[in-house]
Image: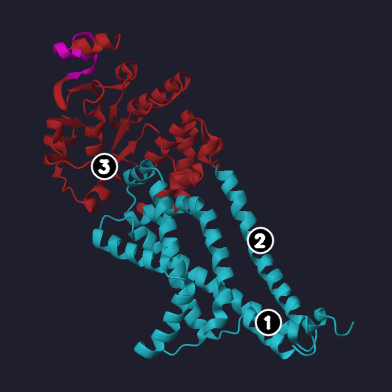
Amino acid sequence: MTEEILKVEHLNKFYGDWQALHDISFNLKKGEVLAILGPSGSGKSTLLRTLNGLENYKNGEIVFHGKKVQPSPKEWQAIRQKIGMVFQSYDLFPNLTVMQNILLAPTKVQKRDRAEVEQEAHHLLKRVNMDQYADTYPRELSGGQQQRVAIVRTLAMKPEVILLDEITASLDPEMVRGIEDIVKKLSENDHMTMILVTHQMNFAKRVADQVLFLEKGRIIEKTPCEQFFTEPQSERAQQFLTDMDF
Amino acid sequence: MAHSGINVLFSGSNFDRLLVGLWTSIWIAALSIIIGLLIGTIFGVLRTMPNKIIRCILRVYMEIFRILPSVVLLYLVYYILPRSLHINWPGTWMAVLAFSLWVAAEFSDIVRGALQSVPLAQKESGLALGLSKMQLFLYVLLPQAFKLELPATINLATRVIKTTSILMLISVMDVINVGQQIIEANNQKFPTGVFWVYGLIFFFYFILDYPLSVWAKSLMAKQK
Protein backbone atom coordinates (compact mmCIF):
# COMPACT_ATOMS: atom_id res chain seq x y z
CA MET A 1 0.00 0.00 0.00
CA THR A 2 1.33 3.42 -0.94
CA GLU A 3 1.96 5.97 1.72
CA GLU A 4 -0.72 8.48 2.58
CA ILE A 5 0.76 11.96 2.35
CA LEU A 6 -2.11 14.35 2.98
CA LYS A 7 -5.41 13.85 4.74
CA VAL A 8 -8.24 16.31 5.23
CA GLU A 9 -10.88 15.56 7.84
CA HIS A 10 -14.21 17.30 8.39
CA LEU A 11 -12.97 20.67 7.28
CA ASN A 12 -15.35 23.63 7.55
CA LYS A 13 -14.59 27.11 6.32
CA PHE A 14 -16.59 30.29 6.72
CA TYR A 15 -16.46 33.76 5.22
CA GLY A 16 -18.31 35.64 7.95
CA ASP A 17 -21.66 33.84 8.25
CA TRP A 18 -21.39 32.20 4.88
CA GLN A 19 -20.05 28.67 4.84
CA ALA A 20 -17.68 28.17 1.93
CA LEU A 21 -16.62 24.59 2.65
CA HIS A 22 -18.82 21.94 4.29
CA ASP A 23 -17.36 18.95 6.05
CA ILE A 24 -14.60 18.25 3.52
CA SER A 25 -12.78 14.93 3.97
CA PHE A 26 -10.46 13.20 1.57
CA ASN A 27 -6.97 11.79 1.41
CA LEU A 28 -4.11 11.82 -1.01
CA LYS A 29 -1.55 9.08 -1.56
CA LYS A 30 2.04 9.61 -2.56
CA GLY A 31 2.34 9.99 -6.32
CA GLU A 32 -1.36 10.52 -6.79
CA VAL A 33 -2.79 13.30 -8.94
CA LEU A 34 -6.13 14.59 -7.71
CA ALA A 35 -8.29 16.91 -9.80
CA ILE A 36 -10.79 19.09 -7.99
CA LEU A 37 -13.63 19.82 -10.39
CA GLY A 38 -16.92 21.60 -10.08
CA PRO A 39 -18.90 24.61 -11.24
CA SER A 40 -17.70 28.17 -10.60
CA GLY A 41 -18.06 29.17 -6.98
CA SER A 42 -18.11 25.61 -5.74
CA GLY A 43 -15.12 26.27 -3.46
CA LYS A 44 -12.43 24.49 -5.49
CA SER A 45 -9.82 27.20 -5.23
CA THR A 46 -10.76 27.95 -1.63
CA LEU A 47 -10.19 24.32 -0.73
CA LEU A 48 -6.85 24.28 -2.52
CA ARG A 49 -5.76 27.45 -0.74
CA THR A 50 -6.62 26.07 2.69
CA LEU A 51 -4.22 23.19 2.00
CA ASN A 52 -1.18 25.47 2.24
CA GLY A 53 -2.59 27.90 4.75
CA LEU A 54 -3.37 30.79 2.41
CA GLU A 55 -6.95 30.49 3.72
CA ASN A 56 -7.76 29.64 7.30
CA TYR A 57 -10.51 27.26 8.35
CA LYS A 58 -12.86 27.15 11.27
CA ASN A 59 -12.60 23.52 12.26
CA GLY A 60 -11.53 20.17 10.99
CA GLU A 61 -8.08 18.81 10.46
CA ILE A 62 -5.38 18.81 7.86
CA VAL A 63 -2.94 15.96 8.41
CA PHE A 64 0.38 16.03 6.58
CA HIS A 65 2.54 12.90 6.77
CA GLY A 66 0.44 11.60 9.64
CA LYS A 67 0.92 14.75 11.71
CA LYS A 68 -1.90 17.17 12.39
CA VAL A 69 -1.13 20.66 11.12
CA GLN A 70 -1.33 23.30 13.85
CA PRO A 71 -2.76 26.25 11.93
CA SER A 72 -0.16 28.81 13.05
CA PRO A 73 1.77 31.09 10.68
CA LYS A 74 5.04 29.48 11.70
CA GLU A 75 3.90 25.94 11.08
CA TRP A 76 2.38 26.88 7.74
CA GLN A 77 5.59 28.59 6.72
CA ALA A 78 7.46 25.33 7.32
CA ILE A 79 4.86 23.21 5.55
CA ARG A 80 4.75 25.49 2.50
CA GLN A 81 8.30 24.41 1.75
CA LYS A 82 6.90 20.92 1.19
CA ILE A 83 3.53 21.85 -0.32
CA GLY A 84 4.28 24.09 -3.28
CA MET A 85 1.72 26.06 -5.24
CA VAL A 86 1.45 27.40 -8.77
CA PHE A 87 -1.09 30.15 -9.45
CA GLN A 88 -3.35 31.10 -12.34
CA SER A 89 -1.59 34.43 -12.88
CA TYR A 90 1.96 32.95 -12.46
CA ASP A 91 2.86 35.74 -10.01
CA LEU A 92 6.57 35.75 -10.67
CA PHE A 93 8.34 38.57 -8.86
CA PRO A 94 8.74 41.35 -11.46
CA ASN A 95 11.75 42.86 -9.65
CA LEU A 96 13.79 39.67 -10.09
CA THR A 97 15.13 37.82 -13.11
CA VAL A 98 13.95 34.31 -13.94
CA MET A 99 16.96 32.81 -12.17
CA GLN A 100 16.60 35.07 -9.13
CA ASN A 101 12.93 34.15 -8.91
CA ILE A 102 13.89 30.49 -8.77
CA LEU A 103 16.82 30.89 -6.36
CA LEU A 104 15.09 33.14 -3.82
CA ALA A 105 13.23 30.58 -1.72
CA PRO A 106 15.74 27.68 -1.89
CA THR A 107 18.64 29.93 -0.85
CA LYS A 108 16.88 32.24 1.61
CA VAL A 109 14.26 29.94 3.11
CA GLN A 110 15.93 26.56 2.83
CA LYS A 111 19.45 28.03 3.10
CA ARG A 112 20.75 25.66 0.46
CA ASP A 113 24.02 26.18 -1.35
CA ARG A 114 23.56 28.76 -4.09
CA ALA A 115 25.78 27.12 -6.71
CA GLU A 116 24.07 23.79 -6.22
CA VAL A 117 20.57 25.25 -6.52
CA GLU A 118 21.62 27.25 -9.55
CA GLN A 119 22.85 24.14 -11.29
CA GLU A 120 19.60 22.41 -10.47
CA ALA A 121 17.63 25.42 -11.69
CA HIS A 122 19.38 25.31 -15.07
CA HIS A 123 18.56 21.64 -15.29
CA LEU A 124 14.89 22.28 -14.50
CA LEU A 125 14.72 25.23 -16.90
CA LYS A 126 16.14 23.02 -19.64
CA ARG A 127 13.38 20.52 -19.02
CA VAL A 128 10.77 23.16 -19.78
CA ASN A 129 12.78 24.72 -22.62
CA MET A 130 13.37 27.97 -20.76
CA ASP A 131 17.08 27.84 -19.95
CA GLN A 132 17.96 30.56 -22.47
CA TYR A 133 15.75 32.98 -20.48
CA ALA A 134 17.52 32.57 -17.13
CA ASP A 135 18.63 36.21 -17.01
CA THR A 136 15.43 37.67 -18.43
CA TYR A 137 12.87 39.62 -16.43
CA PRO A 138 9.34 38.18 -16.27
CA ARG A 139 7.74 41.12 -18.13
CA GLU A 140 9.69 40.14 -21.26
CA LEU A 141 8.13 36.66 -21.29
CA SER A 142 4.79 35.44 -22.62
CA GLY A 143 2.19 34.03 -20.23
CA GLY A 144 3.06 30.45 -21.13
CA GLN A 145 6.75 31.10 -20.58
CA GLN A 146 6.07 32.77 -17.23
CA GLN A 147 3.99 29.81 -16.13
CA ARG A 148 6.84 27.44 -17.01
CA VAL A 149 9.15 29.49 -14.84
CA ALA A 150 6.58 29.52 -12.04
CA ILE A 151 6.45 25.71 -12.15
CA VAL A 152 10.24 25.52 -12.04
CA ARG A 153 10.29 28.01 -9.15
CA THR A 154 8.03 25.68 -7.19
CA LEU A 155 9.96 22.55 -8.20
CA ALA A 156 13.25 24.10 -7.06
CA MET A 157 11.93 23.89 -3.49
CA LYS A 158 11.77 20.09 -3.91
CA PRO A 159 8.16 19.95 -2.71
CA GLU A 160 6.40 16.71 -1.88
CA VAL A 161 3.03 17.98 -3.05
CA ILE A 162 2.24 20.64 -5.64
CA LEU A 163 -1.05 22.53 -5.72
CA LEU A 164 -1.98 23.80 -9.18
CA ASP A 165 -4.60 26.54 -9.10
CA GLU A 166 -6.12 26.96 -12.59
CA ILE A 167 -2.63 27.15 -14.02
CA THR A 168 -3.79 27.12 -17.65
CA ALA A 169 -6.78 29.46 -17.27
CA SER A 170 -4.98 32.70 -18.22
CA LEU A 171 -3.04 31.23 -21.12
CA ASP A 172 -3.54 31.49 -24.84
CA PRO A 173 -4.99 28.19 -26.13
CA GLU A 174 -1.80 27.26 -27.97
CA MET A 175 0.19 27.57 -24.74
CA VAL A 176 -2.11 25.33 -22.71
CA ARG A 177 -0.92 22.09 -24.22
CA GLY A 178 2.73 22.77 -23.36
CA ILE A 179 1.91 23.39 -19.71
CA GLU A 180 -0.29 20.28 -19.58
CA ASP A 181 2.58 18.24 -20.99
CA ILE A 182 4.87 19.48 -18.23
CA VAL A 183 2.38 18.45 -15.56
CA LYS A 184 1.83 15.09 -17.24
CA LYS A 185 5.57 14.42 -17.27
CA LEU A 186 5.92 15.47 -13.66
CA SER A 187 3.38 12.83 -12.79
CA GLU A 188 4.71 10.07 -15.05
CA ASN A 189 8.47 10.58 -14.72
CA ASP A 190 8.81 12.06 -11.26
CA HIS A 191 5.71 10.56 -9.63
CA MET A 192 4.97 13.99 -8.23
CA THR A 193 1.95 14.19 -5.95
CA MET A 194 -0.35 16.95 -7.20
CA ILE A 195 -3.74 18.49 -6.62
CA LEU A 196 -5.12 20.54 -9.46
CA VAL A 197 -8.09 22.81 -9.83
CA THR A 198 -9.14 23.41 -13.41
CA HIS A 199 -12.06 24.21 -15.68
CA GLN A 200 -10.42 22.34 -18.52
CA MET A 201 -11.84 18.82 -18.46
CA ASN A 202 -9.28 17.58 -20.99
CA PHE A 203 -6.48 18.61 -18.69
CA ALA A 204 -8.01 16.78 -15.73
CA LYS A 205 -8.72 13.72 -17.83
CA ARG A 206 -5.16 13.60 -19.15
CA VAL A 207 -3.32 13.88 -15.86
CA ALA A 208 -5.56 13.01 -12.91
CA ASP A 209 -5.89 9.68 -11.13
CA GLN A 210 -8.82 10.72 -8.95
CA VAL A 211 -11.50 13.36 -9.31
CA LEU A 212 -13.02 15.22 -6.40
CA PHE A 213 -16.29 16.74 -7.55
CA LEU A 214 -17.37 19.75 -5.53
CA GLU A 215 -20.58 21.75 -5.50
CA LYS A 216 -21.52 24.58 -3.17
CA GLY A 217 -18.60 23.74 -0.93
CA ARG A 218 -19.57 20.08 -0.53
CA ILE A 219 -17.92 16.98 -1.91
CA ILE A 220 -20.48 15.33 -4.16
CA GLU A 221 -18.28 12.44 -5.17
CA LYS A 222 -14.71 11.18 -5.26
CA THR A 223 -14.22 8.86 -8.19
CA PRO A 224 -11.28 7.41 -10.12
CA CYS A 225 -10.65 9.74 -13.03
CA GLU A 226 -11.55 7.44 -15.90
CA GLN A 227 -14.79 6.44 -14.28
CA PHE A 228 -15.72 10.03 -13.52
CA PHE A 229 -15.66 10.99 -17.17
CA THR A 230 -17.41 7.85 -18.45
CA GLU A 231 -19.91 7.03 -15.71
CA PRO A 232 -20.00 9.59 -12.91
CA GLN A 233 -21.81 8.37 -9.81
CA SER A 234 -23.91 11.44 -9.13
CA GLU A 235 -26.55 13.01 -11.29
CA ARG A 236 -25.07 16.39 -10.50
CA ALA A 237 -21.69 15.40 -11.95
CA GLN A 238 -23.41 14.00 -15.04
CA GLN A 239 -25.19 17.30 -15.50
CA PHE A 240 -21.93 19.19 -14.98
CA LEU A 241 -20.11 17.19 -17.64
CA THR A 242 -22.99 17.75 -20.06
CA ASP A 243 -22.87 21.48 -19.34
CA MET A 244 -19.14 21.46 -20.01
CA ASP A 245 -19.83 19.72 -23.36
CA PHE A 246 -17.88 16.74 -22.25
CA MET B 1 34.18 98.18 -12.29
CA ALA B 2 35.95 97.35 -9.06
CA HIS B 3 32.82 98.31 -7.20
CA SER B 4 30.40 96.37 -9.40
CA GLY B 5 28.28 94.18 -7.13
CA ILE B 6 29.42 90.85 -8.60
CA ASN B 7 32.87 91.37 -7.08
CA VAL B 8 31.39 90.87 -3.62
CA LEU B 9 31.41 87.18 -4.41
CA PHE B 10 35.13 87.12 -5.05
CA SER B 11 36.47 89.55 -2.51
CA GLY B 12 38.33 87.93 0.37
CA SER B 13 37.22 84.37 1.02
CA ASN B 14 33.54 85.14 0.39
CA PHE B 15 33.03 82.56 -2.34
CA ASP B 16 34.69 79.82 -0.30
CA ARG B 17 32.63 80.76 2.71
CA LEU B 18 29.46 80.49 0.64
CA LEU B 19 30.55 77.06 -0.58
CA VAL B 20 31.19 75.94 3.01
CA GLY B 21 27.71 77.20 3.92
CA LEU B 22 26.26 75.33 0.97
CA TRP B 23 28.05 72.17 2.09
CA THR B 24 26.45 72.54 5.55
CA SER B 25 23.02 72.78 3.91
CA ILE B 26 23.75 69.79 1.72
CA TRP B 27 24.98 67.42 4.41
CA ILE B 28 22.16 68.33 6.77
CA ALA B 29 19.65 67.68 3.98
CA ALA B 30 21.37 64.46 2.86
CA LEU B 31 21.75 63.02 6.35
CA SER B 32 18.16 63.90 7.24
CA ILE B 33 16.89 62.28 4.06
CA ILE B 34 18.88 59.07 4.69
CA ILE B 35 17.83 58.77 8.35
CA GLY B 36 14.27 59.81 7.50
CA LEU B 37 13.98 57.23 4.72
CA LEU B 38 15.22 54.43 6.99
CA ILE B 39 12.83 55.28 9.83
CA GLY B 40 10.05 56.08 7.35
CA THR B 41 10.44 52.66 5.73
CA ILE B 42 10.07 50.91 9.08
CA PHE B 43 7.07 53.05 10.01
CA GLY B 44 5.54 52.53 6.58
CA VAL B 45 5.87 48.74 6.89
CA LEU B 46 4.38 48.84 10.40
CA ARG B 47 1.45 50.84 9.06
CA THR B 48 0.50 47.93 6.77
CA MET B 49 0.42 45.49 9.72
CA PRO B 50 -2.80 44.33 11.34
CA ASN B 51 -1.98 45.79 14.78
CA LYS B 52 -4.44 48.67 15.20
CA ILE B 53 -2.69 50.41 18.10
CA ILE B 54 0.65 50.69 16.31
CA ARG B 55 -1.12 51.81 13.15
CA CYS B 56 -3.03 54.48 15.04
CA ILE B 57 0.03 55.85 16.85
CA LEU B 58 2.03 56.06 13.63
CA ARG B 59 -0.87 57.69 11.83
CA VAL B 60 -1.07 60.40 14.48
CA TYR B 61 2.71 60.86 14.32
CA MET B 62 2.56 61.20 10.56
CA GLU B 63 -0.28 63.73 10.62
CA ILE B 64 1.31 65.89 13.31
CA PHE B 65 4.69 66.13 11.63
CA ARG B 66 3.13 66.72 8.26
CA ILE B 67 0.85 69.47 9.45
CA LEU B 68 3.44 71.31 11.59
CA PRO B 69 5.23 74.03 9.59
CA SER B 70 8.92 73.16 9.35
CA VAL B 71 9.87 76.37 11.17
CA VAL B 72 7.72 75.45 14.15
CA LEU B 73 9.17 71.97 14.22
CA LEU B 74 12.68 73.35 14.08
CA TYR B 75 12.01 75.77 16.96
CA LEU B 76 10.36 73.05 19.02
CA VAL B 77 13.39 70.80 18.72
CA TYR B 78 15.86 73.63 19.17
CA TYR B 79 14.27 75.10 22.30
CA ILE B 80 12.49 72.19 23.97
CA LEU B 81 15.23 69.55 23.90
CA PRO B 82 17.85 71.61 25.77
CA ARG B 83 15.40 73.05 28.30
CA SER B 84 13.21 70.07 29.10
CA LEU B 85 15.52 67.18 28.41
CA HIS B 86 18.89 68.87 28.91
CA ILE B 87 20.12 67.70 25.56
CA ASN B 88 22.61 70.24 24.31
CA TRP B 89 23.49 69.40 20.77
CA PRO B 90 24.92 71.78 18.19
CA GLY B 91 22.32 73.46 15.97
CA THR B 92 23.28 71.31 13.01
CA TRP B 93 22.38 68.10 14.89
CA MET B 94 19.13 69.61 16.06
CA ALA B 95 18.38 70.42 12.44
CA VAL B 96 19.13 66.86 11.35
CA LEU B 97 16.86 65.53 14.10
CA ALA B 98 13.96 67.82 13.20
CA PHE B 99 14.26 67.18 9.48
CA SER B 100 14.68 63.41 9.94
CA LEU B 101 11.48 63.24 11.98
CA TRP B 102 9.68 65.20 9.31
CA VAL B 103 11.06 63.10 6.42
CA ALA B 104 10.22 59.89 8.33
CA ALA B 105 6.62 61.05 8.73
CA GLU B 106 6.19 61.99 5.09
CA PHE B 107 8.01 58.91 3.82
CA SER B 108 6.07 56.49 6.04
CA ASP B 109 2.94 57.47 4.16
CA ILE B 110 4.63 57.10 0.79
CA VAL B 111 5.86 53.61 1.75
CA ARG B 112 2.47 52.57 3.12
CA GLY B 113 0.73 53.69 -0.07
CA ALA B 114 3.26 51.94 -2.30
CA LEU B 115 3.16 48.70 -0.29
CA GLN B 116 -0.62 48.68 -0.47
CA SER B 117 -0.54 49.03 -4.24
CA VAL B 118 1.67 45.97 -4.71
CA PRO B 119 -0.84 43.29 -5.82
CA LEU B 120 -2.00 40.86 -3.11
CA ALA B 121 -1.06 38.00 -5.46
CA GLN B 122 2.62 38.94 -5.04
CA LYS B 123 2.32 38.50 -1.30
CA GLU B 124 0.57 35.15 -1.62
CA SER B 125 3.04 33.91 -4.19
CA GLY B 126 5.85 34.77 -1.77
CA LEU B 127 4.13 33.14 1.19
CA ALA B 128 3.41 30.03 -0.88
CA LEU B 129 7.17 29.65 -1.38
CA GLY B 130 7.65 29.58 2.38
CA LEU B 131 9.09 33.08 2.73
CA SER B 132 8.80 34.57 6.20
CA LYS B 133 7.09 37.95 6.62
CA MET B 134 10.47 39.63 6.93
CA GLN B 135 11.82 37.95 3.80
CA LEU B 136 8.63 38.78 1.95
CA PHE B 137 9.07 42.49 2.68
CA LEU B 138 12.80 42.48 2.06
CA TYR B 139 12.97 40.64 -1.24
CA VAL B 140 9.53 41.04 -2.78
CA LEU B 141 7.32 43.83 -1.47
CA LEU B 142 9.77 46.63 -0.61
CA PRO B 143 11.75 46.43 -3.88
CA GLN B 144 8.48 46.64 -5.82
CA ALA B 145 7.18 49.43 -3.60
CA PHE B 146 10.49 51.27 -4.02
CA LYS B 147 9.89 51.58 -7.74
CA LEU B 148 6.40 52.95 -7.19
CA GLU B 149 7.48 55.41 -4.53
CA LEU B 150 10.62 56.76 -6.23
CA PRO B 151 9.06 59.85 -7.88
CA ALA B 152 7.34 60.91 -4.65
CA THR B 153 10.58 60.30 -2.74
CA ILE B 154 12.59 62.48 -5.07
CA ASN B 155 10.00 65.24 -4.72
CA LEU B 156 10.28 64.93 -0.97
CA ALA B 157 14.07 65.26 -1.25
CA THR B 158 13.77 68.47 -3.27
CA ARG B 159 11.45 69.87 -0.60
CA VAL B 160 13.94 68.99 2.15
CA ILE B 161 16.77 70.71 0.26
CA LYS B 162 14.66 73.83 -0.22
CA THR B 163 13.59 73.86 3.40
CA THR B 164 17.20 73.93 4.62
CA SER B 165 16.93 77.65 3.84
CA ILE B 166 15.24 78.15 7.24
CA LEU B 167 18.23 76.76 9.14
CA MET B 168 19.56 80.25 9.80
CA LEU B 169 16.65 80.68 12.21
CA ILE B 170 18.40 78.34 14.62
CA SER B 171 21.81 79.92 13.93
CA VAL B 172 23.19 77.15 11.72
CA MET B 173 25.82 78.58 9.39
CA ASP B 174 24.11 77.42 6.24
CA VAL B 175 24.47 79.06 2.86
CA ILE B 176 21.72 81.63 3.55
CA ASN B 177 23.20 82.61 6.89
CA VAL B 178 26.68 83.01 5.38
CA GLY B 179 25.22 85.02 2.52
CA GLN B 180 23.41 87.27 4.94
CA GLN B 181 26.65 87.93 6.84
CA ILE B 182 28.53 88.69 3.64
CA ILE B 183 25.85 91.11 2.54
CA GLU B 184 25.88 92.92 5.87
CA ALA B 185 29.68 93.10 6.04
CA ASN B 186 29.98 94.44 2.50
CA ASN B 187 27.02 96.76 2.47
CA GLN B 188 29.13 99.90 2.19
CA LYS B 189 31.61 98.64 -0.35
CA PHE B 190 29.14 96.75 -2.58
CA PRO B 191 25.68 98.30 -2.30
CA THR B 192 24.26 95.94 -4.96
CA GLY B 193 25.96 92.92 -3.42
CA VAL B 194 22.68 91.60 -2.04
CA PHE B 195 21.47 90.94 -5.54
CA TRP B 196 24.58 88.95 -6.46
CA VAL B 197 24.78 86.98 -3.24
CA TYR B 198 21.15 85.90 -3.37
CA GLY B 199 21.50 85.40 -7.10
CA LEU B 200 24.28 82.91 -6.46
CA ILE B 201 22.29 81.20 -3.68
CA PHE B 202 19.34 80.93 -6.05
CA PHE B 203 21.67 79.37 -8.59
CA PHE B 204 23.02 76.88 -5.99
CA TYR B 205 19.56 75.72 -4.98
CA PHE B 206 18.51 75.52 -8.61
CA ILE B 207 21.50 73.34 -9.47
CA LEU B 208 20.69 71.01 -6.57
CA ASP B 209 16.96 70.74 -7.08
CA TYR B 210 16.35 71.01 -10.79
CA PRO B 211 18.02 67.73 -11.85
CA LEU B 212 16.04 65.91 -9.13
CA SER B 213 12.84 67.48 -10.31
CA VAL B 214 13.54 66.49 -13.93
CA TRP B 215 14.39 62.96 -12.82
CA ALA B 216 11.12 62.63 -10.87
CA LYS B 217 9.13 63.92 -13.84
CA SER B 218 10.72 61.50 -16.28
CA LEU B 219 10.10 58.59 -13.89
CA MET B 220 6.45 59.57 -13.57
CA ALA B 221 6.09 59.82 -17.32
CA LYS B 222 7.56 56.31 -17.63
CA GLN B 223 5.16 54.87 -15.08
CA LYS B 224 2.12 56.11 -16.98
Q: Nearer the viewer, residue A104 or B194?
A: B194
Q: Amino acid at mark 3?
A: Leu
Q: Is residue B150 above or below residue A2?
A: below
Classify mark 1: helix, strand or loop.
helix
Q: Amino acid at mark 1?
A: Gly
Q: Residues within 10 Å of mark 1 (few under 14, many from 20)?
A: many
Colour of chain B in the image: cyan
What chain is tagged by disc 3? A
Few, some or many residues within 10 Å of mark 3 (<14, 14–19, 20+): some
Which color mode does the image show? Answer: by chain
Above or below, comparing residue A21 to residue A114 in the picture = above
Whether pointer 1 and pointer 3 mark residues with C-beta atoms closer than 8 Å, the reply is no
Give the residue drawn at x 66%, y 61%.
B210
Q: Which residues are magenta?
A: A223-237
Q: Mark 2, chain letter?
A: B
Nearer to us of marks 3 and 2 is: 2
Residue A96, relative to residue A229: is it above or below? below
Return the residue at label 3: A54
Viewer-side label of 1, 2:
1
Residues A7 and B42: in front is: B42
Q: Chain of mark 1?
A: B
Please provide percent x and percent y for residue A118: 47, 46
Q: CA distance from mark 1 to mark 3?
A: 61 Å
Q: Which residue is mark 1?
A: B179
Q: Position of residue B144 (x, y in %)?
A: 46, 50
Q: Residue at x 33, y 65 (%)?
A: B60
The answer to whether residue B80 shows anywhere in this view is yes
Q: Quadrant of residue A80?
A: top left
Residue ID for mark 2: B210
> What secondary structure is marked by label 2?
helix
Which secondary structure dominates the residues rendered in magenta?
A: helix
The chain drawn red is chain what? A
